[in-house]
Image (cartoon, rainbow, N blue to C red):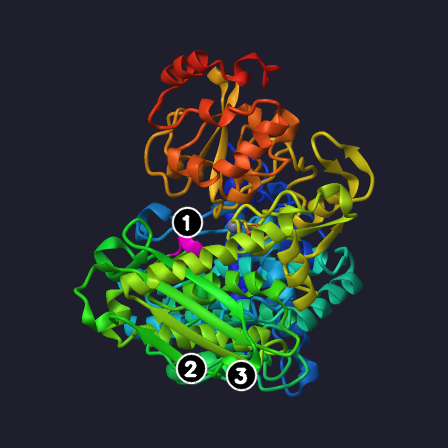
């Protein structure tokens, strides 16, 4: 490291300490002197400060004391900096800079937020719940790295291309700071790039100090997952050692044009001081600015500060310098591909082609075949392709994936099939919702204009199935059909397969097994959500039965479907077991402690967002109504499916409401704690007819053989008043059952 660089780091650290000191003096001199100075929804107060100093900062007085302590390390830059061993003081100054930055952020929340671009929702401090879900994904490799962007490149095009490059590699990108008044989040917003946690592009905070939030996540990972308590210098070094080993993070400092003004230089020295702070965590910085470098090894995995990197290679350089191993499958398609595109919507005005939803039939089916029945890599499109229709048109679609492998078992089919949702959604410009025969697919005008055609959809499925299940599959072929008559004929066959799969699990009873399975696949967007899947209660998306989970666990022993040993039965009627509760507490990041498998009223299971149906109590009727996703009309609780979905989704427990899979409707255990099928007072006619046989069977067992005809549909009632009149007329049993409350 050069003397010049060391001096700049010290100057920046001092500036930050002074700013923090001034801010705290203002705070404690003002009316809020006794108010706690800490972030919301965290048990770690100011987590970076806690990890680095062992001190908990809760009140302005603590902050004042701590600032005066850490400021000492910023006062005297060493006279000579010649070897790696001389870096110690600069690293210490960097730590002081981080503590100061965190105090500034805590005191200011988001400075002058009102004056900023209103299109951007700055996320600020990530709560513990959010950090846990990020941390888990960082540690298990689903998120290969975190990149913190400090500053902004000079053009919007560069900003977009850097963002896309990071997204395509599934790297979580946190946007902070500015360069000469430019903010990368604002550049992306002006180009219409979608930002948020689900697209992996997160506007964290507008100022340089916001970069400390990224290190706060890293520090919490060490304290929480590494079980390392904060404390003295040794404790600190253990925490920093863990971060260096386990958490892949790097900083991209963008834009160098502010170095030419004094104010810019001042800000740049603050950025450098923060970067020096990052080095303590093994987080290197890569920049396009021409500044002195720190090429010493031993601080981070490789070099610590690399400068003068051209923007078109800066993402790759960051990955290389941090030593991140990425397995990127190159898929030969004309649009970008990566996890960050999963949350992307294709709006109506922007649709080139649509399949399923309410406008046409669309389904997908994955089948295992004999080795000689599959031609590996073959993609067939039968019927009109995207360039043979008018923009905005709807087409029917059958997606048939056929696989062959020596160890492939029929049980695995639905496990692989369910992944089609994720694999296709990762394609930029492709929106995929649902599964089986409820698929709804949209392809955007941009994707079409870029040359995307249906065969590319097949390419995506083949590439991803091979990447994820290569050990299981020797051959994969995809057939996409868009001809109405053919799709309909194939649908009959598909429905028979779906039914057969459901029957296989329908025979089994919960009491026969000592283990259930969890599914945490949906934690990617509902961080605390856990499905507990039992033989008689499938996952609420309808795609995971107990057998599916067992198969999935066999394929991916460390994957999202872990076995849950039931343990002691706490309540056989409600369906509570000690083992399930214990598992839940860990898997929900501490958010949930109890689940009832068979109750809608007490500790019901959480709902993520992909439930096929919603069950909701209708208090006036002392019963429960069920509405399916496809039903667009009003229900007797005064809400449509989508309004209710918005309120109960996201992984929370909402007593009185339950997201459920269709299969659960015919289960012996369907809300059995509240009386099961006898409670059902209303269903859309289509749903009722689709499940009539199973419902009939349960109704007979419950001693009310004509119950199914007493259940109201939208033809009988859409308000509680109408419903009550109907129920009284047919003498529905719910009216005389024990009160739900
Ligand atoms: Fe798994 Fe439940 Fe999500 Fe279905 S809804 S994928 S079972 S977590
Ligand atoms: Zn879900």
**Most foreground residue, 637 or 504:** 504
Q: Which of the 4 image quarters holds residue 100?
A: bottom right
Image quadrant in which the C terminus is located: top right
Residues at circles 3 and 2 in contact by the CB criterion of under 8 Å: no
**Most foreground residue, 75 or 642:** 642
**Image position of 584 (left or right of 277):** right
Give the residues in magenta.
Answer: 434-439
Residue at x 60% of width, y 81% of height: 323
| Residue holding disc 3 | 372
Camera-near label (3 vs 1) is 3
| Residue holding disc 2 | 378
Task: Assess whether residue 563 is covered by the magenta stretch.
Answer: no
Residue at x 52% of width, y 22% of height: 623
Q: Which of the 4 image quarters holds residue 201?
A: bottom left
Residue at x 19% of width, y 67% of height: 389
The secondary element bearing badge 3 is classed as helix
Q: Position of residue 375 (x, y in %)?
A: 47, 83
| Residue holding disc 1 | 111
Query: Tag 2 or tag 3, which sits nearer the N-term?
Result: 3
């Amino acid at each position: 490291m050069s003397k010049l660089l060391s001096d700049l780091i010290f100057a920046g650290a001092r500036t930050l300490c002074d700013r923090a000191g001034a801010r705290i003096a203002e705070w404690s001199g003002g009316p809020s002197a006794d108010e706690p100075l800490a972030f919301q929804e965290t048990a770690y107060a100011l987590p970076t400060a806690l990890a680095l100093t062992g001190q908990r900062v809760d009140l302005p007085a603590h902050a004042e004391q701590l600032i005066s302590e850490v400021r000492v390390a910023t006062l005297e830059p060493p006279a000579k900096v010649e070897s790696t061993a001389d870096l110690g003081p600069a690293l210490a100054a960097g730590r002081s800079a981080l503590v100061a930055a965190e105090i500034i952020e805590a005191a200011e929340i988001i400075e002058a937020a009102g004056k900023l671009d209103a299109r951007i929702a700055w996320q600020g401090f990530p709560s513990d719940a959010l950090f846990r879900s990020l941390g888990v994904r960082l540690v298990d490799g689903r998120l290969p790295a975190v990149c913190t962007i400090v500053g902004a490149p000079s053009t919007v095009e560069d900003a977009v291309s850097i963002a896309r490059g990071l997204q395509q590699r599934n790297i979580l990108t946190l946007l902070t700071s500015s360069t000469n008044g430019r903010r990368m989040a604002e550049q992306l917003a002006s180009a219409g790039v979608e930002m948020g946690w689900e697209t992996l592009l997160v506007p964290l905070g507008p100022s340089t100090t916001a970069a400390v939030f990224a290190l706060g996540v890293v520090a919490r990972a060490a304290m929480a997952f590494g079980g390392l308590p904060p404390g003295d210098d040794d404790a600190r070094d253990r925490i920093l050692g863990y971060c260096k080993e386990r958490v892949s993070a790097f900083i991209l400092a963008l834009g160098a044009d502010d170095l030419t003004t004094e104010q810019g230089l001042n800000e740049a020295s603050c950025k450098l001081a923060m970067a020096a702070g990052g080095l303590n965590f093994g987080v290197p910085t890569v920049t396009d600015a021409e500044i002195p470098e720190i090429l010493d090894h031993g601080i981070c995995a490789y070099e610590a500060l690399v400068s003068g990197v051209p923007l078109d290679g800066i993402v790759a350089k960051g990955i290389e310098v941090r030593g991140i191993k990425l397995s990127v499958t190159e898929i030969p398609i004309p649009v970008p591909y990566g996890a960050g595109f999963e949350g992307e919507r294709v709006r109506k005005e922007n649709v080139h082609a649509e399949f399923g939803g309410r406008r046409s039939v669309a389904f997908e089916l994955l089948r295992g075949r004999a080795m000689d029945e599959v031609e590996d890599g073959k993609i067939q499109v039968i019927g009109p392709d995207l360039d043979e229709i008018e923009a905005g048109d709807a087409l029917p679609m059958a997606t048939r994936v056929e696989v062959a492998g020596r160890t492939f078992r029929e049980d695995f089919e639905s496990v692989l099939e369910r992944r089609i949702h994720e694999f296709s959604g990762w394609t930029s410009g492709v929106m995929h919702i649902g599964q089986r025969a409820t698929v709804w697919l949209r392809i955007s005008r941009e994707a079409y204009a870029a040359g995307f055609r249906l065969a590319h959809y097949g390419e995506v499925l083949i590439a991803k199935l091979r990447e994820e299940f290569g050990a299981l599959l020797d051959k994969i072929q995809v057939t996409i059909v868009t001809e109405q008559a053919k799709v309909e004929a194939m649908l009959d066959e598909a429905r028979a397969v779906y039914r057969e799969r459901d029957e296989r699990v329908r025979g089994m009873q919960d009491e026969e097994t000592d283990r259930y399975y969890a599914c945490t696949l949906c934690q990617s967007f509902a961080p605390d959500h856990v499905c507990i899947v039992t033989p008689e209660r499938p996952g609420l998306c309808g795609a995971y039965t107990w057998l599916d989970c067992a198969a999935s666990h066999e394929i991916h022993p460390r994957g999202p479907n872990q076995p849950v040993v039931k343990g002691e039965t706490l309540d056989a009627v409600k369906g509570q077991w000690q083992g399930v509760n214990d598992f839940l507490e860990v898997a929900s990041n501490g958010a949930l402690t109890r689940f009832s498998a068979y109750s809608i009223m007490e500790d019901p299971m959480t709902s993520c967002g992909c439930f096929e149906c919603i069950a909701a109590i209708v208090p006036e009727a002392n019963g429960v109504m069920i509405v399916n996703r496809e039903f667009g009309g009003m229900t007797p609780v005064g809400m449509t499916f989508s309004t209710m979905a918005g309120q109960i989704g996201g992984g929370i427990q909402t007593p009185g409401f339950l997201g459920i899979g269709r299969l659960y409707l015919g289960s012996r255990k369907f809300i059995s704690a509240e009386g099961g099928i006898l409670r059902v007072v209303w269903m859309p006619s289509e749903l009722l007819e689709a499940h009539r046989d199973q419902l009939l069977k349960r109704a007979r067992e419950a001693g009310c053989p004509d119950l199914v005809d007493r259940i109201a549909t939208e033809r009988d009632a859409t308000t509680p008043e109408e419903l009550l009149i109907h129920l009284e007329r047919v003498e529905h049993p719910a009216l005389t059952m024990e009160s739900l409350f």
